[in-house]
Structure formats: structure tokens, C-alpha cells
Image (spheres, helix red, strand yellow):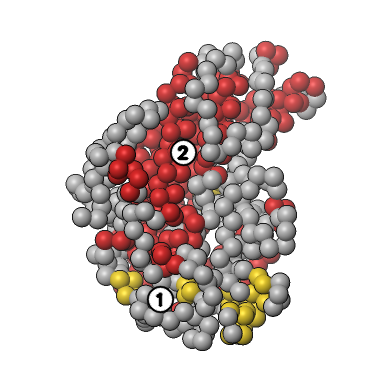
Amino acid sequence: MLAGLSLTITSCDMDQMPHNAIPTDKSWEQVSDAEKFRTGLYSYYQGANGGTYYYSPDLQSDLFNALKGFGNNGGQMHKWSFDASDGDTSSFWSVRYGCISAANNIINNIEKLEPANNLEEAYLEVTLGDAYLIRAICYHELALRFAKDYEPGTTEPGLPLVTAVDVNEKPSRSTLEETYEFILQDIDAALPLLDKGQQTLYALYTQLSSEGAAGKIKANIATYYLNDFYLSGDAAKVLKARVLLYMHKFDEAAQLAESLISAGDYPLSTSEDSYKAMWVNDEGSEIIFRTFSSVSERANPIPHYMMYSTASKKFSPYYIPNQATLDLYEEADLRSKVFFTSEEIKVETVDATVFLFTKFPGNPELKKADEDRYHMFKPFRIAEMYLIAAEANYQAGKVAAAQKALNDLRKGRGASAIESAGEALFTEIQNEWIREFIGEGRRLEDLKRWHQGLDRSNKPVQNEEAIVSGDTYEKLKIDANDMKFVWEVPMNDQRANPNLKPNWK
């Protein structure tokens, strides 16, 4: 059986096809064509992580204060003064629809290819699985930003569901319920493809020799098809648990999250060194998927929190965490040691010592200059499953299970156990989402999911002299029903497609 196996690898690096230029008019004639498009799809998805896609939603929330001299960087989001022409929100929309188009190209064309053997068949299966899953990821991320919070039976506007590569198409918006059902369908299509294809690839990997042509195929399978730079069935399960939580399918969400935890394949990083390595070096046992980066292919740095002035030899960041955020962490919590560092800053005429947000210091292997802040982003890791299990079990009335999931995560992070119940327990679960995911763009969607408003005025700041003060800064209050919790469909898209119903009426 193995003697007939062959798979020509035409692009060994994920930078062979830039994320802004996938030539969808290329023919689909051989398996290597699928590989090129798969490379392009992952390149698109790499570009949809980090940068403004992480910091804009968090700066819009209640975790950070703008510092004097911040130059209005991220200011429109922070002040809630953005509109339908805002570049950050428009980019979020366009990049994800570009990614969806790349996925559609694969989904609609891959059946044209005839695999020559079971190796090629498995490769095509994982490629198709990737396309379904990345399309589901993008649609869910778009729904979180451009639609209201999901409520069962909702008829609120969802997203235009594009399933073909057609630049002339002018789709209208589906309902939000239809959007979520479509996302679940894509996840359910991806799961068996990824599981079956990867199981076949792993079986072949274990049978192949490490020499000659077989050795080259074995190396390619290990490097390009069976590592955490590529999505997996487990990543699909993480996304499904996430979507089920938003759909109020709490029992299903908790069961799926608990199954991933109990499998034990992604143990928590429980020492300061291992936890720090996950954020500095982008390596760790709990990572289920990370986006590929190399020193020659980097995407979307996150510099806002650690800007450094060579003139003053002090930091001059745009934003720092408020004191209320810092106070959420116990001293022994690994996250307090890794995410925050006391440093001297100089902003305009103010010299002070404050805690900076240091979750994204820059991976040393990706740096061309000392102040580069590039990373391999980690949108799927096991910690989320503990939080989904905690929240979903709480919402389902299973207090003991909720406490266990919460405390298992806290124990892994070196924090003390929580014994509270009722509303106090839910508050701790909500705070744990902040403690774990601060800086990853999750806070705004959490507030929306819980139907909570935003009040910076009741959150003490670190240094009153260093921050920008005013009603749209540290005194900002936003009602839970404010329309800007839902971002507006970009104005250019509204003009190009009159069928797109706007959010802000």
C-alpha cells in the first residue's frame, strides 16, 4: 500500500501566497492546486488575528485608560465616537469576508480533484475541513461584532451568508438564528473531515520510514498537516462549544467543553515559566491552534500597551490597565506576574511608575528590532473550555459543576479556590473571563452576552495625572442597550449593496 503513495509539496512555507491576493481564477486540476489555495486560506486567517482585531474591542470596553500623548490611537473606539466609516470596524468586516471568499473557493471546487491514493484523499479531506471551519470561525466573529446578542428564537438581523465566489452578488442579511444555524452546519461538516483526514494522515505517518521518498512524505505530514499551525477536530469542538454557549444551549456547551478537558490532551500551563513561554514564545501544552508566523511573515503587532521612547529611555504607551483590572488578580496568580509589569513611563510632562500590560511583549524569534511586538496568536486553547464549562453549568443550574470548572482553572493559574454561589459565583466567572482573556478582544462580546452596560467611572485608575480625563474617557458610562455595542455595517458595503440593512437606524 505505501509504495504507491506520493504527494508533491509545492509550497512548504505558509507565506507562498499572500493573504491579500488569492487568485481564485486558477484552475483546479491537481492536488497541489488545493495546497496552494489552502496556504492562501491560512494566510488570510493569519491576517484576521491580532492587531486592531484584538485591541479595538478591548479599548472600547472598561479595562484600560488612555494616557496623555496617546495621539488618539484607538481613540475613536475608546471614546465610542466611531461611525460606519471607521477603519477598524470596516477592516474587521472586510478581512473576514475575504477569508470567507477564500474558503468558498475551496468548498466549491475541491470536488473537481481526483485523489490518486489514500494520502491524497486524506489531504483533500483536511483541506475541505479547514475551509468549512474557517468559514464558521469568520461568520461567528462577524456575528459577535455586527449583530445583537443571540437569544433563542431571535428574528434580529444576522449576516449576509455568502457561499459562492461572486463579486457581483448582493446578498441581503439572514436572520441571526439562520446565521447561527449556518455556523453550526459548517462546524458539523468540518468535524468528521478533520478527524478522519488527520487520523489517516497520522496512521500513514507512523507506517512510513524516515528515509528516502517515504521519509520526505513523513516529514511533510508531520510538519504541514499534523501540528498546531493547522486546525483540527479539537479546534472545531472548541468553536462549537463557544457557539453553543452563545445560543443558550448550556448543557451541550458544558458537555463538549468538559469532554475536551477530561481527554487530557492539552494540560494547563501551571508554572510561571511555562505560562510565560506561552505568551512570550507562543509555545505551550494548552494551545490547540496557533497562527503561523516567521520573521519573514508577520501579521498585526499589538504595540499600544508597550510603546518605548528611546529619547527618554522610558515607556510611553498609549493605554494602561486601570487599577480595578489589576485588583482582579491575586498576588500568587500566574497571570498577574506575566500580564503586568511595573515600569517607569513618561507621557508628555508626567513621569510615573505604573503597571503596563505585557501579555504581548513580542516573540524574540519574530523580532527584527527590539520594539517589535509580533506573535503567533492562539485563538483556540484549553483555558476557554474551563470558562465555558463554568458559565454554561452555572446557567444550567449546576452550581457544583460550575464551581469545579472555575476552580480547576484557578488552581492551574495559582489562584485560590472560589466557594461562592448564586450571583457572587457568576460574578467570579465573569471576572475570570477578564483574568484569562484580557487583551484578546473578548471583553466587549462578554458584556454584550451578559447584557451589561459599561461604566468606567466606578473603576479606579492607576495614576490620575498620567491619563486623559473626561466624560468620554475614564468617566464614560454606556447603557447596555447602546446601539454601538453592535458595530455598524461598513458604509462602503452599504453603498455597494443596497440589500444590506444597517444596524443603526
Task: Determine whether 366 is above or below 66 in the image.
Answer: above
Figure quadrant of residue 267: bottom right
Identify the amino acid type marked 2: Cys
**Callout 1: 10 Å neighbours few (<14), some, many (20+)?**
many
Quadrant of the frame with the C terminus: bottom left
Please, is residue 254 above or below residue 343 in the view?
above
Name the quarter where the N terminus is drawn: top right
Separation of marks 2 and 1 at Cα, in angstroms: 34 Å
The local crowd at label 2, few if under 14, some if 14 to 19, many if 20 or more residues have their Cα within 10 Å, is: many
356 vs 64, left or right, is right
Mark 2 or mark 1, which has the lower sequence index? 2
Instruction: Name the residue: 55% across, 39% down.
Output: 19
x%, y% of residue 394? Answer: 33, 62
Provide the residue designation for mark 1.
Answer: 473
Which disc, if any, is residue 207?
A: none
Evaluate whether residue 109 shows in this view: yes
Under circle 1, the secondary element is: loop
- Mark toward the viewer: 2 or 1: 1
In the image shown, does 25 or 478 lie closer to the viewer? 25
> Percent from the top left, x then y, of residue 205?
67, 28
Q: Which residue is mark 2?
A: 99
Q: Is disc 2 placed on a helix, strand or loop? A: helix
Q: Amino acid at mark 1?
A: Tyr
Residue 52: percent from the left, percent from the top? 49, 56
| Residue at image coords 47%, 82% | 461
The structure residue drawn at horizontal position 62% and vertical position 44%, both measured from the top left corner, is: 292
Q: Nearer the viewer, residue 412 or 489?
A: 489
